[in-house]
Amino acid sequence: MLSENKPLKTLTFLSILLVLLAFLMVIFYAPVELNMGMVQKVFYFHVSAAWLGMLAFLVAAISGILFLSKKNLLYDHIAASSVEIGLLFTAIANFTGMIWARPIWNTWWTWDPRLTTMTIMAFTYIAFILLRRGIDEPYKKARFGAIYALVGFVSVPITFFSARLLRTIHPIIIGGGSGEMAMTSRMYQTMAAGLVAFTLLFVVLLWQRTRLAEAAAVIDRLKAEQNAEEFGEVENG
């Protein structure tokens, strides 16, 4: 059973407050965008979710490096947990992007370079989870996961820069100077609040999921030891 973690509990409460504050800023503080209208407000959640997906895959790659150098299974638990969270928020980013695209592009989906590379990125990490399930030995699984997380991370910068390097209809919000979306200072403040709130939420989710992964590893080890003892008793009997 997991023991109570007061710092994590406090951080969880704070993250909930910040996410709620960011939501209220989107609804009441950020003005309605001139060209796109109310549907533009979806972008605050879309950008934050996309950022979290890429951040999570970066954390997984760094954790992979740490495992390869230190051989500590904790880093494997962090990497696997981070990939799961990254996939969740990548799915949210795709879903919110589709909600925005339907009235703006008149279609739910288009094979735009940004959308295509994000989809490839998502399937890259889905394969990470599926392939790891075929490996039982913890250190072998962790070594495979670490190498895969490093190689798979190549898809992340490709996704991020695709809208800047390739011809795309996807708006570039930060540093793009796109005229498609008339952003004001209050809009950027709201987006910054969303990024901070979602980043803290990611820290909380990663902490919680890693604790669960460690607890599951302990249970698996105890089960293996119990099975070994029972098998030894059968042989001796």
Image (cartoon, grey):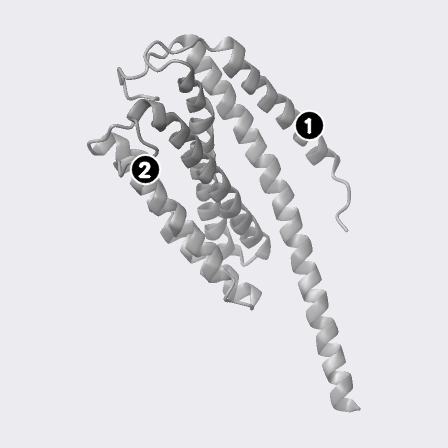
> Tag 1, which secondary structure?
helix
> Could you tell me the amino acid type at mark 2?
Leu
Q: Residues within 10 Å of mark 1 (few under 14, many from 20)?
A: few
Question: Quarter-wise, where is residue 207 in the image?
Answer: top right
Of badges 2 and 1, the one in the foreground is: 2
Q: Quadrant of the C terminus?
A: bottom right
Above or below 193: residue 229: below
Above or below 12: residue 158: below
**Residue bearing mark 2:** 115
Spatial CA span between label 2 and label 1? 34 Å
Q: Position of residue 204 (x, y in %)?
A: 61, 36
**Residue bearing mark 1:** 13
Most extreme residue toward the left, as rendered? 167
Which residue is rendered at x = 52% and y = 14% of the image? 27
Q: Position of residue 216 (x, y in %)?
A: 66, 57
> Could you tell me the amino acid type at mark 1?
Phe
Q: Position of residue 132 (x, y in %)?
A: 49, 61
Q: Position of residue 81 (x, y in %)?
A: 55, 48
Question: Quarter-wise, where is residue 111 in the image?
Answer: top left
> Tag 2, which secondary structure?
helix
- Can residue 115 be spotted in the picture? yes
Left or right: where 117 falls relative to 230: left
Q: Residues within 10 Å of mark 2 (few under 14, many from 20)?
A: many
The first of marks 2 and 1 along the sequence is 1
Above or below 192: residue 235: below
Question: Quarter-wise, where is residue 39 in the image?
Answer: top left
Left or right: where 63 falls relative to 73: left
Q: Which residue is nearer to you in this view: 70 or 12?
A: 12
Total numbered circles: 2
